[in-house]
Structure formats: C-alpha cells, structure tokens
Image (cartoon, rainbow, N blue to C red):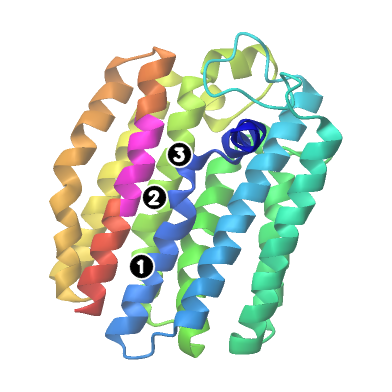
Amino acid sequence: MALLTVGRPWVQAARPATLWAALAPVLVAAGLASGDGVFRWDAFLGAAIGSTAIQIATNFANDASDAKRGVDTADRIGPTRMVATGVITERQMWTATFLTFGVAALAGVWLVAIAGWVIVIVGVASIVAGLGYVGGPRPYGYRGLGELFVFIFFGIVATVVSRFVHDQTIPLDAWLLAIPMGFLVTAILVANNIRDIETDQATGKSTLAVILGRPRTRRLYATLVYGAFAAIAVFGTFRLTPLATLIAVFWFPWAVPLVRTVNNETAGPLLISVLKGTARLQLLVAFSLALGASA
C-alpha cells in the first residue's frame, strides 16, 4: 500500500488519461502493415514503447518547466502538477524525464536494428521537440506553436514512422491516415488549452488558445474533431485507404457531445472530461482504422 502511495504522484505526472494518444498512431500503422502482409510484432512493440516513453517524458518535462516559469499557479484548474505543489522536486522530475527518454532511446536502438539509421534522426528530433515544448530559452508551447508541433510529431511522424519500421516503406494510406490521427491528437491539446485560457493569459503563457480567444478556439476544436471524420470518410470512399477503414466513422456520434461541451461550457471539470473523452475517442478511432486496414 505504501508503495502505491509513493507511486501515485508519478502516475499523475505521467498524465495517464492522455497516454492513449501515444498508442493510437502505432495501432493504425500496425493495422496497415497487417493488411499489407508485413506486420512484425517486434516493430510494433518497439514503436509502442518508444512512443509512449516519449510522451511520458514530455509530460514530466512540462511539469518541471511550467513550475520553474511559475505558470502552474493555485488558480489553475485541472490535475495537480507535482513540481509546482512540491510533491516531487524539480531535480527528481528532471531525473525521471531523462530516464524515461532513455527508455525511448533503448526502444529506438531496437528499431534501428530493425529499420535502419533513419530512426535515429526521427528519435532525436522527437526528443528535442518534447523538451522544447515548454523548456529551453524559447519554448514554442508559449508562442502558439504547440498544436502545430503536436500535429507533426504525435500525428504525422508517429503514424508514418510506426508504419515504416515494419518493412521500411511508407505507403500512401499511411500518410493519409496520419492526418486524422494528427487532427485528433491536436484536439486533445486544444481541449487542454481552452480550459486554461484565463490562467495561462494571467501568467504570460501565450498558447494558441490565448492568442485566438475562446470563440475561435472552440471553432478550431470542432474543425479538428469533425475534420478527422471527414478525412476518414473521403479517403475510404475514394479507396485511397482500405474501404473497411470507413468503420471508424461509426464513432462520429461520440464526437458530437464533446464539441457541444466545448462550445457551451467554460467550467474546468467539464472541459477536463472533454480532454479525457477526446483521448478515448482517438483510441477508438485508431482501433477501428487498424481493424479496417488489416481486413
């Protein structure tokens, strides 16, 4: 029991509700590889471990960096930030950050043995992007660029590279299905940032939501979520991706209440539920795309 109590702050710091976003593109890529007859379990596990480790390490780094810059104040609404509240020291959090990036690096070595040295370039770029989100002298997450980097690295790159490691090719359908994956993972960040508009603005953190304001950020969230389903429908209908991937459109009704809540509510707890719901929606869509692609 004591061990569970000690470990709970670290679980919270990892932000488990959103970790599915790391696995979703890996699932889609695995489904595509299976449909092409080139699926490899070792490649799948390496990609899943590496992707998840990078996201956890990025979350740890964000916790430490936000605390150092004083942006996680007592007025903030949302899950407890461990360094800002003194539950975990800054040094402990940075140690955990680099250890977790080390796990990602080990998974990267595994993938290099399977798919070659291009994985080194992708891995280093992903780690630098994770550290630079709210860290370093000019954190891009404080300048309205967080959504762009998340779309690129946790959507496009995560999907196409996870497909690449199976047979060192990236078919067109991998690039195309990376787009809805990118839209949905970006929507998770938008849901997080629209919740924190007032507190971020007060502490000088210029997220895209702060720059755009609440009305336009609401439209951005709806565009990303509905756009993901529109892309899936168009790609599947015109056979640019396997026809059976259209089964992912089944989850569209689950997206409607999420968009409605973002459009109508400002209360923190309700918007936290949207963040978690968007992460679950991405996982469900990813699983369906993987199933359809492998059929």
Residue 208 versus residue 59: which sits nearer the camera? 59
Per the picture, the main secondary structure of the magenta-coloured stretch is helix
Please state the extent of the stretch shown in magenta in the rendering: 274-283
Q: Which mark is residue 17?
A: 3
Q: Earlier in the sequence, mark 3 or mark 2?
A: 3
Q: Is residue 191 above or below residue 132?
A: above
Q: Amino acid at mark 1?
A: Val
Residue 138 % position (x, y): 79, 39
Q: Which mark is residue 28?
A: 1
Confirm whether residue 220 shows in the render: no
* Relative to 85, 277 lies left or right: left
* Relative to 86, 15 lies left or right: left
Mark 1–mark 3 Cα distance, whole angstroms, equals 19 Å
Q: Nearer the viewer, mark 3 or mark 2?
A: 3
Residue 127 versus residue 41: which sits nearer the camera? 41
- The local crowd at label 1, few if under 14, some if 14 to 19, many if 20 or more residues have their Cα within 10 Å, is many
Q: Is residue 230 above or below residue 158?
A: above
Element marked by disc 3: helix
Q: Earlier in the sequence, mark 1 or mark 2?
A: 1
Q: Earlier in the sequence, mark 1 or mark 3?
A: 3
* Relative to 26, 136 lies left or right: right
Residue ID for mark 2: 183
Q: Nearer the viewer, mark 1 or mark 3?
A: 3
- The local crowd at label 2, few if under 14, some if 14 to 19, many if 20 or more residues have their Cα within 10 Å, is many
Mark 1–mark 2 Cα distance, whole angstroms, equals 14 Å
Residue 275 % position (x, y): 40, 33
Q: Which image quadrant for residue 222?
A: top left
Q: Nearer the viewer, mark 1 or mark 2?
A: 1
Q: Residue furthest front?
A: 1
Q: Amino acid at mark 2?
A: Phe
